[in-house]
Image (tube, helix red, strand yellow):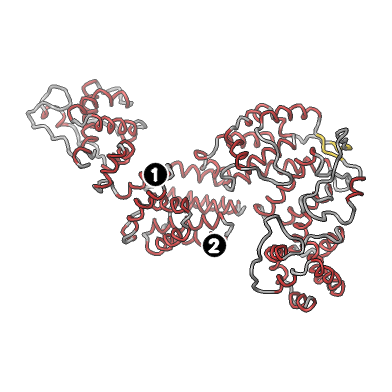
Amino acid sequence: MFQYDVADSDDFEQIIVQAVQRILEVPDPNDFLNWARETIPPLLTLPNYMDALERGRFATLLGVTIWNATPLPQHGFTIRPIPTPMPNARCYCGSGLRYRDCCSKLEDAPELSSEVIWMVLINALSDAELKRALQLNAVPKHLLAIIADQWLDENRPRRVLALLEPLFAESLAELSGDFEPAFDILCNAYDLLDYSRKKAAFLDRVCAEGNGQLQAAAWQRRSTMHLDAGEFTQAEEAFTAALRSHPNNPSTALLEITLLVTQKKLALARQRAQFWLHQFQRLENFDDDLFLSFLERAVTDPQGALMDADENGIHPVLIELREWITQHCQRPLPVYTIAPFQPTPGRKQRVSRLLPNTIKTRSTKALEKQEKFEFLPPPSIRKTERVWQSLFPIGKPLSTQLTLSDDEDEEIWGNPEWIQGLLEYPELADSLDVLDDIATALGAYPETELPWISQLLLWPLLERAWSIIIAATPTDDIHYLPWEVPSNQPALRLLFRRYYYQLDDAKDLQGAIATLETMLRINPHDNHGVRAELMNLYLRDGDNERAVALAQQFPNDMLTELVYGEVLALYRLGQKEQARIVLTKAAQRMPHVSNYLTRKRIKQPGFNPRGITVGGEDQAWFYREEMRDVWAAEPGILDWLKRQTA
């Protein structure tokens, strides 16, 4: 009679919530049907052809359906259906007609599962009622995940374990995919309690014994764990196992695209998004339009699609920041000038010293005599920068560090009014000082490891900063831009961030080398110690000539990377006698390095809480960890090294 599908109504869930609350307050069927006739019709957008009598009948029909599916606390959470009236009895819809002349002629009432009601009822019950429902084992087993999720939000992970572990104690093969939420929450509880071994054993068991969907969930989690650790080979193997366990799983498709984007395989990510889109469109019963929209976006922009997929869980400032970056980081480049640095009168300027014996080719005294220069933004930007500084809640990271304290991290994202300054002043994209602050803020975001944050937000900032810096300091420029000058620090910090992104995220070895070379060119005092990183990259790239030149630029350096890096480069170049001479001096100053390189296994030494001990075993250990694979790959050198230092 009524061609209206209430389940398609956006208000249906709200009707269920209000109805369950009414039943709990007044558990009387007659009262509830009266309430339904008065309350439900205004909540629904019913067809215009339905008059008041038909609306009352429809509301009654829906009310009976809800009541008949609701577990009643006063009856031990069992169902007590409303009896169907006798044919000659007055109809329960309130029309005044006999039932046989009224609602008995209507089509069957829509079906409603008690599990749907339980999903609402769990949140509506008092703690005492919920406890009694659990004692009676009345709650459907797979819906225990709803309760566990609440307890996890309340930081009660041990209660979560007590509730969910029994679900997985018996045969896992009998648990359907409905138990996947419980599986995920139990794993999260293990994480919160730092029960890594228990979690690992649980994952092993689910991967081996669970049904297809649960197996896939376990392999997906393992893949994500490997991905977070940067173990891409293992992550891909776990993804493949998840795919075998449960094909055509949207979560597995999302995982694959995330894996590919994280590894910067964007072209392949687009191809796989196209494959999955076609695959899911062919499935008859697949109706997740939101996921299909994600795939459609990922076909052209996988990074943006991942960001949009996380949109409900991310800070709204990130969304506004992305729009600002998209709109304004392509502005024409500002013209920075390189001007002689004018020290503050009466204040003695000192060369900052982060690392021991930082410079050996030029004395510190010589550097102090050398004319110092500074980056200066256009005059129009300086005034706007002062406005920004009044809005951004914290200062700069300490010294050459890239991160802030935990309290400062919270302050940035707990008081994000600074985004309004960016939106109001697009020209702030011309300021290295502001770009530096935004990069710092992104590094302070609680989920900064999400791949799209670095790719869509951080990298455009770093590229703009690079373009501004290179335009102001061409390769033939000989101006000395020391770290000690405050106005130079944003540029140098941005370059250092660029190096880390290129090496760790983009896997761009040549780009990372170019960035470090630029840092050394404009700040040869090298407060960041990038010469050590650069030496290692030269050696990994096989550029032995530049490795030797770098070492000779810093003679008598106390960094292991330069001292022993020169030895390796000379050996590779066939200059074994010169390599032996350099090694003899190196072994005198750093006697433990050769032993730590030549031994296949060696015990980790104790560490000095105050820092690395120059010439100590800890310094040798760190160099071994970083570069032994490069040494071991050179035929014969470890045996040669052992003989020379015996």
Does residue 515 appear anywhere in the picture?
A: no
Dot 1 falls on a residue whose secondary structure is helix
Q: Nearer the viewer, mark 1 or mark 2?
A: 1
Q: Is 315 placed left or right of 137 in the picture? A: right
Three-letter code, disc 2: Gln
| Residue position marked by numbered label 2 in the rendering | 234
Is residue 560 rendered to the left or right of residue 606? right
Q: Which quadrant is home to the C terminus?
A: bottom right
Q: Give the quadrant of the N terminus.
A: top left
Q: At which x and y percent is residue 372? A: 88, 42
Across and down, in percent, residue 155 comes to 44, 44
Q: In the rendered image, is residue 181 in sight?
A: yes
Q: Is residue 122 above or below residue 23?
A: below
Q: For label 1, count other residues whose C-alpha is less than 10 Å away and answer few (under 14), some (14-19) or many (20+).
A: some
Q: Secondary structure at mark 2?
A: helix
Place residue 492 in its image quadrant. top right
Depth check, front residue: 206 or 133: 133
Give the residue displayed 74% in from the left and 30% down from the top. 385
Dot 2 surroundings within 10 Å: few (below 14), some, or many (20 or more)? Answer: some
Labelled disc at residue 151: 1
Task: Tell me whether the residue at label 1 lies in contact with that at label 2, contact meaning CB atoms closer than 8 angstroms.
Answer: no
Identify which residue, 200 or 126, lies in the foreground.
Answer: 126
Amino acid type, callout 1: Trp
Residue drawn at 45 percent across, 41 percent down: 290
Residue 338 x %, y %: 86, 38
Left or right: residue 434 versus residue 253 is right
Question: Nearer the N terminus, badge 1 or badge 2?
Answer: 1
